[in-house]
Image (cartoon, rainbow, N blue to C red):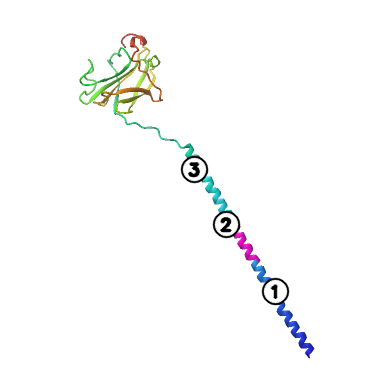
């Protein structure tokens, strides 16, 4: 009987030990699985953070490139209003030489009395005695105030297909009274080319006749 009890207790002890060992293995397995999950999660977070940093780095690089290629705005000048005048019949003769003239109500040239309203406006004349612009149409595009004393006259030029008389290019314009008094002038094409009006060039030397 004692022998049987001994066998029973030994078997029971073995069962208990076996159960404990199985529980420990399960716990170890769970711990390993949990560690693997946490490690994988950390790796994913690291990868996401790395990708985000790379994208931010790319964005910063792109912005720097844009800044390098940025273009500054061109300088803008205040302008004086004006109106180009076209002569269809009986246009005045060319001046003896090239230059820029501003006529007022006190200096109305003979034959110009009805050209503009002299009480409100002055008359601007630009004549270019440069052989380069012979038989060219001249149109004033802007009167830009560079400073208190200087006005830039911006013009466009193109060959006059109807003129073959070797006439100096010129243009009259009506300007608000007093706007151009005491000013000095620069003439420049819309393309930015400086224009020499030829103040010392006689019209008779470049035109077909002394008066055209």
Q: How many marks?
A: 3
Which SS type dominates the magenta stretch? helix
Q: Name the residue tied to disc 1.
A: 22
Looking at the image, residue 117 sits to the left or right of residue 185; the answer is: left
Which range is magenta?
Answer: 32-44
Q: Residue furthest bottom?
A: 1
Q: CA distance from mark 2 to mark 1?
A: 35 Å
N-term mark: 3 or 2: 2
Vertical comparison of 181 with 3: above or below: above
Task: Answer whether labels 2 and 1 touch (C-beta < 8 Å).
Answer: no
Q: CA distance from mark 3 to mark 2?
A: 27 Å
Is the residue marked by circle 1 packed among few (<14), some (14-19), or many (20+) residues within 10 Å? few
Q: Name the residue tied to disc 2.
A: 45
Looking at the image, residue 27 sits to the left or right of residue 179; the answer is: right
Residue 80 percent across, percent down from the top left: 29, 28
Tell me where residue 154 sits by quadrant: top left
Q: Is residue 9 magenta?
A: no
Vertical comparison of 10 with 56: above or below: below
Q: Quadrant of the N terminus?
A: bottom right
Vertical comparison of 73 with 136: above or below: below
Q: Residue at x 74, y 79 (%)?
A: 14
N-term mark: 2 or 1: 1
Q: Name the residue tied to disc 3.
A: 63
Tell me where residue 9 sits by quadrant: bottom right
Q: Is residue 41 magenta?
A: yes
Residue 201 percent across, percent down from the top left: 35, 12
Secondary structure at badge 1 equals helix
Looking at the image, residue 196 sits to the left or right of residue 8; the answer is: left
């Amino acid at each position: 009987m004692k022998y049987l009890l001994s066998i029973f207790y030994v078997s029971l002890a073995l069962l208990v030990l076996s159960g404990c060992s199985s529980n420990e293995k399960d716990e170890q397995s769970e711990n390993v699985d949990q560690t693997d999950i946490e490690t994988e999660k950390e790796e994913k977070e690291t990868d996401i953070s790395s990708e985000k940093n790379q994208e931010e780095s790319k964005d910063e690089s792109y912005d720097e490139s844009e800044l390098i290629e940025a273009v500054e705005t061109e300088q803008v000048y205040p302008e004086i209003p004006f109106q180009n005048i076209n002569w269809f019949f009986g246009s005045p003769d060319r001046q003896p030489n090239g230059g820029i003239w501003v006529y007022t109500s006190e200096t109305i040239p003979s034959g110009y009395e009805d050209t503009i309203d002299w009480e409100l406006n002055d008359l601007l004349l630009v004549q270019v005695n440069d052989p380069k612009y012979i038989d060219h149409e001249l149109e004033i595009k802007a009167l830009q105030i560079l400073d208190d004393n200087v006005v830039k006259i911006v013009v466009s030029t193109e060959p006059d297909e109807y003129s073959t008389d070797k006439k100096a290019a010129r243009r009259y314009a009506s300007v608000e009274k007093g706007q151009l008094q005491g000013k000095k002038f620069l003439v420049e094409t819309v393309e930015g080319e400086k224009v020499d009006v030829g103040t010392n060039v006689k019209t008779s030397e470049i035109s077909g006749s002394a008066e055209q």
